[in-house]
Image: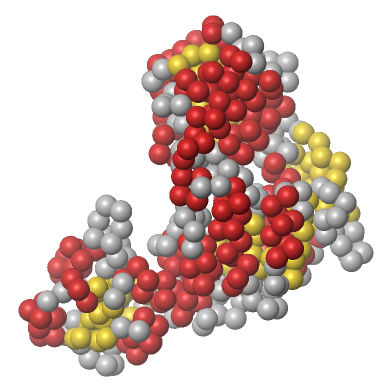
Amino acid sequence: MAPVPWTIDQIVSATGGEQVSGGASVSFEGISIDSRNIAKQDLFVAVKGANHDGHAFIPGVIASGVKGLVVDRRKVGDEEIASWTQANICCVAVADTVRALGDLAAFHRRRFHIPVVAVTGSNGKTSTKELSASVLGRKYHTLKTIGNLNNEFGVPLTLLRLNASHQAAVVEMGMNHSGEIRRLSEICQPDYGIITNVAPAHLEGLGSLEEVMAAKGELMENIKESGAIVLNGDDPCGLKLGASARCRVVYFGQSAGADVRGLDIQNKAFGTQFTLVLPDQTIPAKIQIDIPAPGRFMVSNALAAATIGYLTGVSAEDIHAGIAAFAPVHGRMNIRKSRQGFFIIDDSYNANPGSMEAAIKTLVTLKGTQKGVLAAGDMLELGADSERLHEDIGRIAAQSGINMLFLTGEYAAAVKKGASKQGMTDDCIVIGEKADLAERLADVLGPEDWVLVKGSRSVGMETIVHLLEEADKST
């Protein structure tokens, strides 16, 4: 499908910038912030990220044949503008290129009259995004966030991929400070929003669970009047948010007060089964759902996706089919069996106290009577509560019936302390570097045993998974 073109007038209008060079008749086929793979027909927005400033790559971008730029007016001089004028390079100068990127995405989103779903929450965002896109995809050609492009760069870049073939979109929104969800939802202008849950996460930037709830609740400020916010009816914070909502509220959950309910949950070998109950006497009102991913927490994610399907007119049969077609994202509860016969649960992508506890419960369910081991790294961005929350995880792990803990990171001792208080003996707790842990895990795990690998993104717990897989290949 051909991209929707951009005129220079639209770019100036969207960003509130000033055209400082180039002609008035030029147009562009797309918008990019990546100098490495930009097409000649694209407009280059020179954003400053955590590691690089796009302004440094402008000469290379121009040399590759690109004819359009959006720049920070404070970072370009008259000499550069004169050279761009001579080379017929079209340049729009703005006060803030990151904001301009978002403004361009918001302008582009308004060109499409399709349902847009925004997904946020402390846990389960990506799985819920994938499930929602799979459900909507049964009826609509659906755009979705790729990977974890869920921040001030990722959300605009996702929306800028919209073209005339799309009939719906599902956009994931992450955050680590107050005001971030507000800005992202301003850009996204969602018809429907999902807040999966509210749990202790990003406390370093927000301070308390109440502040996390308020930050997630910013999504509700920009839901369209004709739309709805989809909230977790089993989460006390979800109920609090619903009470303050100005838009329509639809609850999902297992509780009797939920509009879309999940009943009769059963753990299967590598998945989860439940009965979906839809409101309004939908035919069929009840349907058996099979999620191809383990963990009772996945029922909550599937219910949120089912609610979006219900609100957008997807049939119960297609909701079932969409959930059944779900494929777990890499690093999120992926399970594989080694040649030695033990199972690796790769949940290494990220961690906070809520997701860690849910993953531990899943490990205990899956291992049955076999040995279960947790290989855990630090949970980051928890601020002053870090020690206590890590100690809590040690306590929860010991109480759950996990056989051993393999720990690495700054807070490994805190996890050990919590586990020791609950009676786990020192010989069942190993602390070390990731390579050492992987080597010892390979010795400890036997056929039909289970190991869960989990930690915050920047801790790099996937290293243990890779080392176990490499050891597996060499046997």
- Side of 269 relative to 410 (left or right): right
* Quarter residue 154 falls in: bottom left
Specify the farthest residue to the bottom: 24
**Where is residue 441 drawn, in percent x and y?**
50, 16
Specify the farthest residue to the right: 281
Specify the farthest residue to the left: 79
Nearer the observer, 14 or 270: 14
- Side of 4 relative to 125 (left or right): left
Q: Give the colouring mode of the picture.
A: secondary structure
- In the displayed structure, 16 sits above or below 417; it is below
**Where is residue 281 drawn, in percent x and y?**
92, 64
| Residue at 51 percent of width and 77 percent of height | 109
* Quarter residue 13 falls in: bottom left
**Where is residue 418 drawn, in percent x and y?**
58, 21
**Where is residue 183 drawn, in percent x and y?**
48, 68
User: Total of numbered circles in the picture?
Assistant: 0
Nearer the observer, 216 or 149: 216
- In the displayed structure, 322 sits above or below 17; it is above
Q: Can the viewer see residue 313 in this picture?
A: yes
- In the displayed structure, 137 sits above or below 392; it is below
Q: Can the viewer see residue 142 in this picture?
A: no
| Residue at 61 percent of width and 12 percent of height | 424
| Residue at 58 percent of width and 14 percent of height | 420
| Residue at 69 percent of width and 52 percent of height | 237
